[in-house]
Image (tube, rainbow, N blue to C red):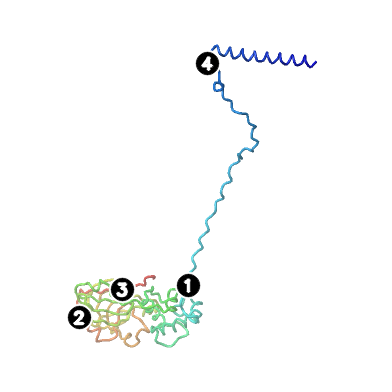
Amino acid sequence: MGRSLGGRSASASLRAVAAVAAMIMVAGCARSTPVTAADLPSVAPYTTPSTAPLPSQTSPTPTPTVSPTPTPPPKPVDPLAGVSAKTRKAFKPCLTKSVGPGGGGTCARLVLKTLKSAHYYRWGIASRVNTAGVNAILNYQRSRGLTATGIVKKATWVALATKAPALPNVLPKKCTTAKGIILCVDQAHRKLSWIRNGKVIKTFTVRLGGWNYHPKTKKWKVFATANGTWKVYAKQVDPPSENYGHGAMPYATIFYPDMYVHYSPGFHAMGYATSSHGCVNIGKLSQAMWIFKHTPIGARVHIFSPKAKSA
C-alpha cells in the first residue's frame, strides 16, 4: 500500500507542475518578457478588525454660565462723620426732625444753643424757638449758602453739627466790573458795599427781611429780601407808609416798591432779634444819610445770596 500511495502522490505533483507550466506558457503568449513578482498586483495584508470602541457620539456637555456677582450698593454716607462722640449723641436724634417757629423740646434748645455758640443768637436759651431764634436760623442759613426757610431740617442740622464754615466773602463780577455807582447787597454776610467804577468805597452792616408780622393782618411769615438787580428811582427823607406810618423808614433810597435802603430805628435798638419786611435796613442814622446823599437816581442796586456748592 505504501508504494501505491507514493506513486499517486508523485503523479499528482507532476500534474500540478505541468498545469503551472502551461499557465505560464499561456501568459507568455501575450508578452515577450517573463512575468516577475513586480508584475503581480499588490494586495494589502489581511488584518484582524479592531475591537476598539467607537468615539462617543453624544453632544459635549455645555459649560455652565456663571451669573455675575451683583455689585453691593454703596454704603450710605455718614453725615456726622468726624464729629465727636458727644456731638453725635446730641445731634443724631434730631437729624430727622424739623424745628421752626414756636418749636420746642430738646432739639429746639439744641438749635438755639448751637446758634449762640456760632454768634447768631445772642439771647437767653428760650424753651421754644422765638422771633429772635427764627431770625437767627435765617441768618445762619444764608451765611452757609443754605435755603433760608427759618426751619431747621437735615442740611441745617448737619451744618450746625459739623461747624460748617461761612461762605467766602466775595463780591460778584456784576458789582466789581460795573461802571458808575452800584449798591451791592450780600445777604450771606449782611453787608452793603457802596461801589464806584468797580472800587468799594464804603461797606455797611445791614439787616434784611426775615420772620416778622404784618401790622394789619397780624400774621407772621418770612418777609424775604428779593435777589436781583434794580435801579434807584426815588429818594425820600420820610416816605409815607400806610402799613408802618411816618418815621419808620427815614432817608429812604428807593429801588423797588416794597424794598428800600433806609435807616431803621428797630435795627438800631434791637439788632438781629427782629428783621425787616424786605427792606435793607441801616442801623446808624449817619450811615443812612451818607448813602442817601451820595447815591444818585439811576444808580443800580444788586442783591444776591451766594449758595454752597452742595446746596
Tell me the element at label 2.
helix
Q: Earlier in the sequence, mark 2 or mark 1?
A: 1
How far separated are the C-alphas under marks 2 and 1? 52 Å
Q: Earlier in the sequence, mark 4 or mark 2?
A: 4
Query: Disc 2 vs disc 3: Cβ atoms closer than 8 Å?
Result: no
Q: Nearer the viewer, mark 2 or mark 3?
A: 3
Q: Which mark sits nearer the N-terminus, 4 or 3?
A: 4
User: Which numbered tag is attached to residue 294?
Assistant: 2
Q: Nearer the viewer, mark 3 or mark 1?
A: 1
Compared across the picture, whether 133 is left or right of 10 comes to left
The label shown at residue 304 is: 3
Task: State which mark lies toward you, 4 or 3.
Answer: 4
Nearest the viewer among 232 and 121 is 121
Viewer-closest of 53 and 225: 53
Say what amino acid the circle numbered 2 marks.
His
Q: In the image, residue 311 lies at what x, y percent?
A: 39, 71
Q: Tell me whether the residue at label 3 lies in contact with that at label 1, contact meaning CB atoms closer than 8 angstroms.
A: no
Counting from the top left corner in percent of width and height, residue 13 is at: 69, 16
Q: In the figure, residue 192 lies in which quadrant?
A: bottom left
Of badges 4 and 1, the one in the foreground is 4
Q: In the figure, 238 relative to 21: above or below? A: below
Residue at the image position 32 percent from the left and 81 percent from the top: 207
| Disc 4 target residue | 33
302 horizontally vs 45: left or right: left
Q: Position of residue 133 (x, y in %)?
A: 41, 82
| Residue 294 quadrant | bottom left
